Image (cartoon, rainbow, N blue to C red):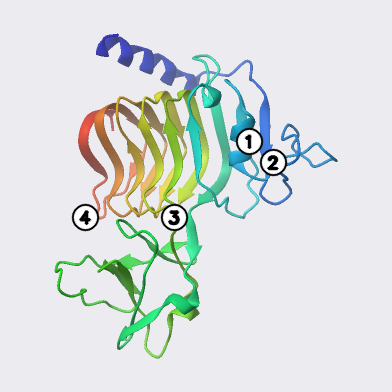
Amino acid sequence: MSMHFQVAVFLVFCSFFATPRLAYGTDYYVSNVSGDDTRSGTSEKPDGRQGPFRTIARALRETVKGDRVILENTGMPYRESITIQAAKNSGRLDEPFQLIGNGAVLDGSAPVPEDKWEHVVGDVFRFHPEKTAYQQLFQGDRPLTRKRSESKEAFPKLAPLEWCLFDRHIYFRVEKDQVPAVYELSYAALPVGITLYEARNVIIRDLVVQGYQLDGINANDSVFRAGFAKVTCRGNGRSGISIGGASRVKLTECQVGNNGDAQLRIEGKCVVEIVDCELMDDGVVPPLKKLGGRVLGK
């Protein structure tokens, strides 16, 4: 199949964003407050054996081609990593598989255990997370200011409430006469929020993905005619969104910022269309890190 033909089919699929949907497969509902993974998942309200699932992963195990997974926005983050893969989590050109967030948050962070902080010197403490290639440090749900290390011999000078990644540790400076325990600190614990692999005709809509050690969303390879609409990816260790291999993805009205290495990262022979998106440019982390691939629009 020629590259021109693949791109043409990709653009036809993208027109779905502006086209009303006439029919759906099965709807599966998820609520991390009222849900239960032993229920049917096919009704929004709990009623005996009927009612929503508790986890997104459980819903994805149940779906077949063309189904929808619909999250309840309970105000509580969904704390899991999920994979959308192959035919089971794919759709058709006129009936895509959908993950609809309703503004819910998918969060990969975890609290730093108070007893894991070590005092270094003065107001500086350090903590050793399980994964250190990329990281983030949060106060509440807000990423704290990171200082980049320019030397392998010593960690950089930190202002109060700044942190750095050095010598496989997170170094953090507290305010005068304080200790880390007073700040409600968390770090990026889970690796990737949503991994897509060998999936076709998939839409992810109206979801916040934050706090993951690598990427918020990673379309790894062979992800064709996928669309992310009104998705926010923030505070992830490497990138908000990473597209690779031969994938074809459209981003529409997405907001991507406060990620560690790049807001949007593309590589391989992928094609990414960007429509009305906000990719933050803070002068330190690039809005787009291009290691290959092709960008349409911007």
N-term mark: 4 or 1:
1
Q: Nearer the viewer, residue 297 or 160?
A: 160
Mark 3 secondary-structure assignment? loop
What amino acid is at disc 3? Gly
Whole-percent x and y of residue 31? 68, 45
Q: Specify whether 141 is left or right of 280.
A: right
| CB atoms of marks 2 and 1 within 8 Å | yes
Could you tell me which secondary element the residue under label 2 belongs to? Answer: loop
| Amino acid beneath label 2 | Phe
* Separation of marks 4 and 3 at Cα, in angstroms: 21 Å
Disc on the earlier residue, 2 or 4: 2
Identify the residue under disc 4.
283
Asked if disc 4 and disc 3 are in contact, CB closer than 8 Å, the reply is no
Residue positioned most to the bottom: 177
Residue located beneath label 2 in the image = 53
**Residue 267 in picture, x, y percent from top left:** 25, 34
Query: Where residue 54 appears, x then y in whole percent?
Result: 67, 45
- Relative to 49, 134 lies left or right: left
Q: Amino acid at mark 4?
A: Gly
How far is mark 4 from mark 1, CA to CA? 40 Å
Residue positioned 36% across, 41% down in the render: 241
Picture quadrant where residue 242 is located: top left
Q: Could you say which disc has been placed on residue 59 in the image?
A: 1
Q: CA distance from mark 2 to mark 4?
A: 42 Å
